[in-house]
Amino acid sequence: MDFDNKNDELKQKKELTQILLHNSVILKITGGKAEISMDNNLHIDIKIDAGMILYIEKGTSISFKHMKKKLMIVLNLLN
């Protein structure tokens, strides 16, 4: 286990970002880690890591808790 990396993560402040989608999207995490909450009549909490791909329907509200300097996402809009 890498204790130095673990301690660095604990010291970093987690940022909250909320997005309401007007189109369906493919969400690809290209770096870092995050916790995502989706609310579309159900509340779902998901831990996501780099390389994961999620399909999210339009009208869904999503919230991210992330370490700002490490998280990068790519949103591809679908019609």
Image (tube, rainbow, N blue to C red):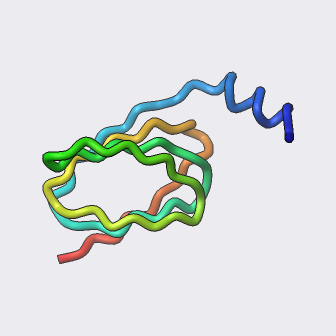
Q: Is residue 21 above or below residue 5?
A: below
- The answer to whether residue 29 is left or right of residue 17 is right
Residue 37 vs residue 17, the one in the foreground: 37
Q: Quadrant of residue 39?
A: top left
Tell me what residue is drawn at x 56 percent, y 62 percent.
Answer: 30
Residue 1 vs residue 68, the one in the foreground: 1
Q: Is residue 27 above or below residue 67?
A: below
Q: Quadrant of residue 11?
A: top right
* Residue 66 x %, y %: 51, 38
- The answer to whether residue 56 is left or right of residue 67 is left
Tell me what residue is drawn at x 55 percent, y 48 percent.
Answer: 71
Count of numbered marks = 0
* Residue 25 x %, y %: 29, 67
* Residue 35 x %, y %: 47, 42
- The answer to whether residue 15 is left or right of residue 61 is right
Tell me what residue is drawn at x 14 percent, y 55 percent.
Answer: 59
Tell me what residue is drawn at x 20 percent, y 55 percent.
Answer: 21
In the image, farthest residue toward the bottom: 79
Pick the quarter of the image with the C terminus. Answer: bottom left
Pick the quarter of the image with the N terminus. Answer: top right
- The answer to whether residue 78 is left or right of residue 54 is left
